[in-house]
Image (tube, rainbow, N blue to C red):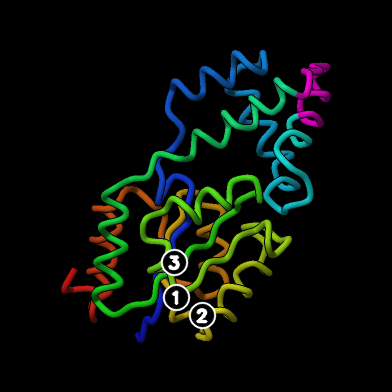
Amino acid sequence: MCISAVVFDYGGVICNLPSPENTAQLERLTGLPASIIRELNRKFRGDWDRGLCNGVDFYRRMLAGKNIFPDDKTLLKIAETDMNGWKQINPDSIRLLLDIKAAGFRLGILSNMPFDFLDWVRENIVIFDQIDTAVFSCEEKTIKPESAIYEILREKLNCTFAQIVFFDDLMDNVSKAQELGIIGCQWNGPQEAEKFLKSLGGGFTAL
């Protein structure tokens, strides 16, 4: 086994999941319970992540389906609140990424992410200059778990699927990666990820 790159999802991996306070604020602004917001996101967020619309337009269309018609100012506040929920970086994740880089492996990010949020990530993720390859759905017009986005990642890394380790918190994304031959692992925190990497042997034993 000759692994050359370790790739991470962003949401729920490099950053923490949105806080209960953030979720409650979205509920107040939209007038919908969190369970319904999650359901609508699963169905309709693809266009936002593909870069086909912005957050205001996404929430306008999403909420119209529930006969909710906020004004543009409120829609902007909803979209900003949504994105603010993904800004809490996990320092232990950052330490793991830096350790992997120091061990001689290439670092990658593979994330479903809208244009609205991408500028903030590039400006505020302190290790972004350490990332060798970053693939974002909005720039590629394809989202996980579609095969195309993994192929773009492989091409940019210039390696085989079997040379990539990939962490994602969503099992659907991990399963597609594994189907293609990537060494995929569902994210259960930095400590568990480190244990998994060490179990692969090679340069990971020094982590």
In screen coordinates, is 23 left or right of 125?
A: right
Camera-near label (1 vs 2) is 2
In screen coordinates, is 65 left or right of 160?
A: right
64 in magenta: yes
Residue 157 is labelled as 2
Element class at badge 2: helix
Identify the amino acid type marked 3. Answer: Val
Residue stretch in magenta? 60-72
Distance (Cα) linking label 1 and label 2: 9 Å
Q: How many marks?
A: 3
In screen coordinates, is 112 left or right of 195?
A: right
Residue identifier under label 3: 7
- The image shows residue 179 at horizontal and vertical percentages of 56, 69
The correct choice, above or below, for 26 with respect to 135 in the image is above
- The residue depicted at 52 percent of the width and 67 percent of the height is 134
The C terminus lies in quadrant: bottom left
Residue 164 is labelled as 1
- The residue depicted at 81 percent of the width and 31 percent of the height is 61
The N terminus lies in quadrant: bottom left
The correct choice, above or below, for 127 with respect to 116 in the image is below
Element class at badge 1: strand
Which tag, 3 or 2, sits closer to the chain's start? 3
Identify the amino acid type marked 2. Answer: Leu
Query: Circles 1 and 2: CB distance less than 8 Å?
Result: yes
Residue in front for this viewpoint, 96 or 38: 96
Which tag, 1 or 3, sits closer to the chain's start? 3
Query: Circles 1 and 3: CB distance less than 8 Å?
Result: yes
